[in-house]
Amino acid sequence: MNNTLKGYLCGIVAAVSYGTNPLGALFLYEDGLRPTSVLFYRFSVGALILGLMLLVQRKSMALTHSEARVIGALGLLFAASSLTYYYSFMFMAAGLASTILFFYPVMVAVIMALFFGERLKVSTGLSIVMALGGILLLYQGDGTATLSLTGMALVIVSALTYALYIVVLNRSRVRMSSVKLTFYVLLICVLCNVVSSFFDPSGGLQGLPTLRSWLSALELGLLPTVLSLVMMAVAVKHIGSTPTAIMGALEPLTAVIIGILVFGEVLTPRLLLGIVLILLAVMVIVMGRQLSPGRVFSFVNRMGHRVVKHWRWR
C-alpha cells in the first residue's frame, strides 16, 4: 500500500477509535468511578494488551538512552494532557471542554510553522477552519454552561501538551515499532496516574465494582487507547503531524454518532451541518496534495451549495 494512503487511513482509524471514549467512560462514571480511576484502568489495560503482544511476538524490550529520553517525554506529555483534560470536567461541562480541546490542530500547525519552517498550505488552513466550525456546531450546550478560568486553563494545557506530543512524535528520530513505543508511553502514563491519585482530594484509586465496569475498562484500553495511539504513530510517520491532527476532527464526530446510535440523542440540522463540515475538512486535507488553491475553493463552494440545497428535511 502507498505510504501516504496508509498514513491517511491510519489517521482516520486513530481518530474514529479515539472517539469511542464515551462508550467506556460514561458507563464507568455511572458506576461511580472518578476521572483518575477511569484513566488508570484505561492506561493499565492498554499497556497490558501491548505488553502481551510484544511478548508473543518475542520483540526486544530494550531501549537505548536516546530512545528512553524521547519516550519519557512522550509519556509525560500524554499523561499531562489526559490528566488535565479529565480534571477540567470538575470545573466545566465535558462537551464544552472537548470543544475547546480541539484547538490543538491549530497549535500543531503553528508550532510546525514557527519552529520547523513548515509552510501552511491553503488546503491545510481551510481544513482547520472547517474542522473548527464543525466542532463548534457539534457542541450542544443548554445555555447555562459557564466558562471557569481554572477549567479553561486546564483544557488549554491539555491541548498544548497533546499538540507537543504529536510534534515530538513527528520530529523524533526514534526508530521502533509503534506497538513498542505506545507500550512504554502507556506505562509512563500509568505511573503518572498512580502518583497523581495520591493528590486527588476525592480519594485514591477505586476498584471496578461490576462486570460492566470491567468490560468498559477493556473497551477503553483497547479502542481509544491501544488502537488509536498505535495508528496515530503510524499516521504521523507517513503524513506528518499537522494532517494527522486535523483528521482528529473525526474524534468528536464519532462521539456524536455514538450518542445518537447508543444513547438516543437526536440528530438535528445543526449536528448534520457540523458533521458535513468535518467530513469536508478531512476530504480537503486528504486531497490537498492534488488540489490547487483554486480547485480547493471551487470544491468546497460546490459542496456547500449542495448542502444548503438539500438541507431542508426538517
Image (tube, grey):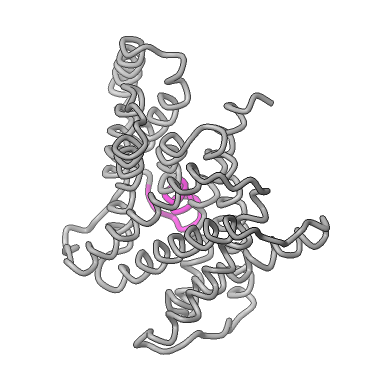
Q: Image quadrant for the N terminus?
A: top right
Q: Is residue 56 left or right of residue 170?
A: right
In the foreground, 159 or 301: 159
Which residue sits at x=35%, y=19%?
A: 303
Q: Is residue 44 left or right of residue 120?
A: right
Q: Image quadrant for the C terminus?
A: top left
From the top left corner, tell me how far across and down residue 87 is, in percent.
34, 71
From the top left corner, tell me how far across and down residue 156 is, in percent.
27, 57
| Residue 34 included in the magenta stretch of the image | no
User: Looking at the image, can residue 271 be seen?
Assistant: no
Q: What predominant SS class does the magenta segment belong to?
A: helix
From the top left corner, tell me how far across and down residue 171 is, in percent.
48, 42
In the image, residue 95 sits, relative to residue 86, either above or below, namely above
Number of disc labels: 0
In the image, residue 22 sits, relative to residue 164, either above or below, namely below
Residue that extends furthest to the front in the rendered view of this protein: 65
Q: Is residue 128 left or right of residue 69?
A: left
From the top left corner, tell me how far across and down residue 184 is, in percent.
61, 63
Residue 106 position by quadrant:
top left
Q: Is residue 168 left or right of residue 305?
A: right
In the foreground, 33 or 85: 85
Which residue sits at x=61%, y=51%?
A: 227
Residue 223 position by quadrant:
bottom right
Which residue sits at x=50%, y=70%?
A: 27
Which residue sits at x=34%, y=31%?
A: 117
User: Looking at the image, can residue 44 be seen?
Assistant: yes
In the image, residue 286 sits, relative to residue 15, either above or below, namely above
| Residue 263 included in the magenta stretch of the image | yes
In the foreground, 298 or 194: 194
In the image, residue 168 sits, relative to residue 284, either above or below, namely below
Query: What span is in magenta?
Result: 254-266
